[in-house]
Amino acid sequence: MKPIKKIVLASGNAGKVREINKLFAGTGIEVVPQSEFNVTEVPETGTTFVENAIIKARHAAECTGLPAISDDSGIEVDALDSRPGVYSARYAGENATDEDNNRLMLKELEGIPEAERTARYQCLIVFMRSHTDPVPIIAQGSWEGRILQAPQGEGGFGYDPIFYVPTHGCSGGELPLDVKNTLSHRSIALNAMLEEFRKHKYI
């Protein structure tokens, strides 16, 4: 297989773009967000993370003619029967901000004791060589923690300020990016994807 030089990232999320580019540094692959090609968001109609990731990667590859990588990620809270899951980004409504989503989660968990506030971030990453790729590469990562009673820290994005990281005694919003990139669900999945790239001699 020939090495890959450029991949379109099927996301306009600035936080994801930063994290993924940092992890791909030194691979020889340029990761370009789909916004640079004026690719519009595609409706995420899947009921699982992997379905949504495939929908987004296929759309980006078809619109740009480039290989595409996409992730679908979210948070599962045990006390909420694994919600919000695939609806994490729009938990508080279609145009919800991170703050709206965090506020709703804290409200739904009012009165739930600390021991029962267990949660995990999940990430599914899909790589498609083209929009007709019959065998996408799929990688998965999860990051265990629990939901705090109130936000802590200004860093990260999504649910990071209310996601407590037991191994480091702080929230995801208080972790430096370099540290987060060694722990997060996305970094675990991306590192697994990079291993697949090495196996296929893409890098």
Image: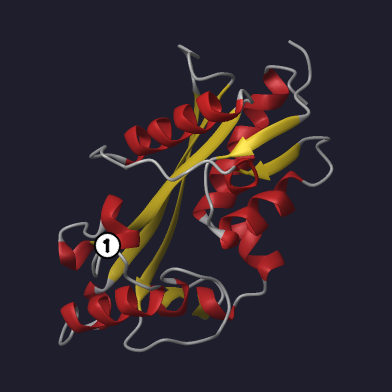
* For residue 156, above or below residue 14: below
* For residue 149, above or below residue 4: below
Q: How many marks?
A: 1
**Residue at figure coordinates x 61%, y 65% from the top left:** 180
Identify which amino acid the numbered label 1 is placed on.
Glu
Quadrant of the image occupied by residue 104: bottom left
**Residue at figure coordinates x 17%, y 86% from the top left:** 110
Quadrant where the C terminus sits is top right
**Residue at figure coordinates x 47%, y 44% from the top left:** 40
Mark 1 Cα-neighbour bin, 10 Å: few <14, some 14–19, many ≥20: few
Q: Secondary structure at mark 1?
A: loop
Quadrant of the image occupied by residue 115: bottom left
Give residue 173's position: percent from left, percent from top: 53, 78
Give residue 161's position: percent from left, percent from top: 46, 79
Q: Is residue 114 visible?
A: yes
The foreground one among 13 and 167 is: 13
Quadrant of the image occupied by residue 32: top right
Q: Which residue is mark 1?
A: 94
Q: Is residue 123 visible?
A: no
Quadrant where the N terminus sits is top right
- 80 vs 179, left or right, is left
- 135 vs 21, left or right, is left
